[in-house]
Image (cartoon, rainbow, N blue to C red):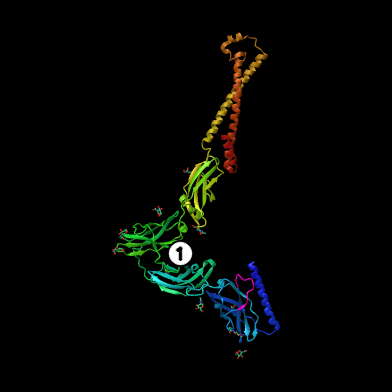
Amino acid sequence: MAGMVCVMGRVAAVLRCVLVVVIPLCVGQTNLKSPQDIEVYAVNTNFTLRWNYTGDGTNVTFSAQYQCFDDLQTNEPEWRELSGCQNVSHTECDFSSAITAYYDVHHLRIRAERREDKSPWSSIFEMVPYEIALIGPPEIALQSINGDIKIKVSPPEANQVRKIWLNPLLFKYNVVIWENSSNAEEILPIDVIEGLAPETTYCLKVQATIPLDYQEGLFSPIHCIKTTRKVNDLLCPTNVRVFALNMKFYLLWNNHYKEHVNYTVQYLTGFLKNLYDDYSSKWQKVSGCENIADMKCNLSSVIQPTSASHYFRVQAMNEYNKTCLSKDIKVDPLVTNEIGPPDVKVDISDVLLHIKITPPGGPANEIMSDLYDLSYNILYWKNSSDNEEVKTKETKQTIATISDLTPSTLYCVKVQAFSKAYNKSSDFSKEECVGTPGGKSLPLIILATFAVALIAVLIVASLLIFFLYQAYNKIKYMFFPSCRTPLNIEGFGGQLFSSPYVPTAEEPVEICYIIESSITEEVNQIDLKDDRHFKHGSRDSGNYSYDDNTSQSKGSEETLGKEIL
Ligand SMILES: *[C@@H]1O[C@H](CO)[C@@H](O)[C@H](O)[C@H]1NC(C)=O
Ligand SMILES: *[C@@H]1O[C@H](CO)[C@@H](O)[C@H](O)[C@H]1NC(C)=O
Ligand SMILES: *[C@@H]1O[C@H](CO)[C@@H](O)[C@H](O)[C@H]1NC(C)=O
Ligand SMILES: *[C@@H]1O[C@H](CO)[C@@H](O)[C@H](O)[C@H]1NC(C)=O
Ligand SMILES: *[C@@H]1O[C@H](CO)[C@@H](O)[C@H](O)[C@H]1NC(C)=O
Ligand SMILES: *[C@@H]1O[C@H](CO)[C@@H](O)[C@H](O)[C@H]1NC(C)=O
Ligand SMILES: *[C@@H]1O[C@H](CO)[C@@H](O)[C@H](O)[C@H]1NC(C)=O
Ligand SMILES: *[C@@H]1O[C@H](CO)[C@@H](O)[C@H](O)[C@H]1NC(C)=O
Ligand SMILES: *[C@@H]1O[C@H](CO)[C@@H](O)[C@H](O)[C@H]1NC(C)=O
Ligand SMILES: *[C@@H]1O[C@H](CO)[C@@H](O)[C@H](O)[C@H]1NC(C)=O
């Protein structure tokens, strides 16, 4: 809406402008040309209007007007005279004093005048001072210290009353230093440029930028300075470094001094270095690291996961109370810290592999998972002789399940924690392995079942044959009875069973009934066993087909589970 109003306002302005232009033309009193190519050049709060004039410039002066659109007013603001740009005879004028609202839209226009004669207004030039202004060069002071160059930067507008860059803390500084090379590097307002050749003249220039607004400033004038010879003091601690894992911070350093030395670790809150004040007196001692003989310091009393950045340095002191300071090192907790591997536990139930992840640093470091917004990379694979592919799964949860498992297979899992926001990842956890059920005993069970079933079938078959034979005999006896009496049979004795023509007496019939009942039982059992055997067989074949086609595995697994139950 605001944009609409604004556009409408501008259209109206243009229309009025056209009217203003047309009326005097109609009156026909001028042939003065309008100025062209209006532009504004601004550095800090210095504003210059420039234009071109192609008409006859004799005795011509120029006068400009401006409109300021502040957010509150809805009406078209009035055109006002632009002070500093009235009756000027050059094609440029300084109107710095007229501009105070650096964030508001301004319209500028200009016309040529010769006594009473006035040209039409030029086209309108629109600007927001803050957007059009360039950042002026900062002021710099250089000092040569032990082979390094110490540089102190004052922000642009440091000594000005009127400021367009209201917050000098938003400035970042780029220095270009050269002897041979000319790469720009970022520096702090008070900084030391190291790694320079001794007794060499270096030249440098500095530029202020506001990265937030994509603004780049002008370079300061070039300053040159000669470095001194570097003196290496053995007492000074070297190679100061931070070891940080799972939010536990330690400062380590080296020293080549032969005699006994005591160390005191000092820290400085990070933002103090961004200020323009001298911070050299603001260093404090790290408790527990005063006058220590170890070359190691526990920084936990100063650095917490949520701390802002800090600088640390080590002061060494020998027995003659001579001291030397190390270089300082920056610790930005979440950036400096390394994430340790998570812990992982695996467990198997039914057809799912359960993975439980303990975040790096354990439960005491939960805040770390939150600050880093940790995710986990789960790698799992079948540990078999043939090279099985490693599958991955990404999760934000600390619990994960994996389905699609092959039975009687050893699965191995390892997990890595990572933070997208900080582009950091941990090492992998130890591998954890677990086997899926239906292991090596399965083929044996199948074999045993098959054997039992086979034996049962054989027994039943032989009994059946025996029964049929008996029945046949009985029938034969009933319809074609033997001429011989039972007494005769008794007389035959031992030949009773050997002869196929043995007549059936009461006792054999009884035996026959007993056999009959046991046969039916047996048959039922055989049916069952047969059935089971068949199913086992089919599952078995299912297993083999599963290896080729994993998509079926879940279904066949479920039937397996039910069958075993
Ligand atoms: C004025 O005209 C000259 C030549 O045509 C051109 O180089 C210059 O950029 C113009 N000035 C402005 C302020 O546009
Ligand atoms: C702005 O103008 C003042 C007065 O004319 C001058 O002293 C100052 O150097 C100018 N600043 C810049 C950055 O040009
Ligand atoms: C310009 O002005 C001067 C004095 O103000 C006058 O003498 C001169 O004649 C004028 N030139 C023209 C072309 O008008
Ligand atoms: C500019 O000239 C006009 C007359 O041409 C005069 O009235 C006005 O006061 C002058 N303004 C300045 C700032 O000199
Ligand atoms: C500058 O260049 C010379 C010769 O090319 C080289 O020997 C010297 O190391 C260079 N210095 C730096 C600081 O790069
Ligand atoms: C480091 O200091 C913290 C708190 O001051 C303490 O909890 C931790 O145990 C210390 N670490 C060692 C290794 O002493
Ligand atoms: C180191 O510090 C300890 C304890 O403050 C002190 O007893 C010892 O004299 C110191 N040694 C040196 C060389 O300063
Ligand atoms: C070192 O300083 C301590 C106290 O600051 C003082 O007691 C001691 O005498 C000094 N030692 C030397 C050798 O100057
Ligand atoms: C995984 O398999 C390899 C060889 O295939 C074997 O050496 C290793 O011990 C197995 N790992 C486990 C945890 O069984
Ligand atoms: C993240 O870190 C890796 C190496 O640790 C690096 O190659 C990559 O460029 C980084 N990505 C971003 C976006 O910083």
Q: Which residue is mark 1?
A: 271
| Residue at x-position 50% and y-position 75% | 161
Q: Is residue 113 visible in the rendered structure shown here?
A: yes
In the figure, is residue 528 to the left or right of 196?
right
Give percent across and percent down for residue 121: 64, 79
Q: Quadrant of residue 32?
A: bottom right
In the figure, is residue 344 to the left or right of 257?
right
The answer to which of 549 and 319 lies nearer the viewer is 319
Asked if the stretch drawn in magenta spans residue 105, the answer is no
Q: Is the shortest distance between ligand 6 and the CB of mark 1 under 8 Å?
A: no
Q: Quadrant of residue 453?
A: top right
In the figure, is residue 152 to the left or right of 459?
left
267 relative to 538, above or below: below
Q: Amino acid at mark 1?
A: Phe
Which segment did they paint magenta? 69-80
Q: Secondary structure at mark 1?
A: helix
Q: Is residue 410 visible in the rendered structure shown here?
A: no
Q: Quadrant of residue 303?
A: bottom left
Binning the other alpha carbons within 10 Å of mark 1 as few (below 14), some (14 to 19) or many (20 upward) gives: few
Give percent across and percent down for residue 484: 63, 9
Q: Main secondary structure of the magenta part?
A: loop
Give percent across and percent down for residue 295: 36, 57
| Residue at x-position 50% and y-position 48% | 357
The answer to which of 186 and 362 lies nearer the viewer is 362
Give percent across and percent down for residue 254: 36, 59
Asked if the stretch drawn in magenta spans residue 70, the answer is yes
The answer to which of 106 and 124 lies nearer the viewer is 106
Quadrant of the rendering where the N terminus is positioned:
bottom right
497 relative to 60, above or below: above
Quadrant of the rendering where the C terminus is positioned:
top right
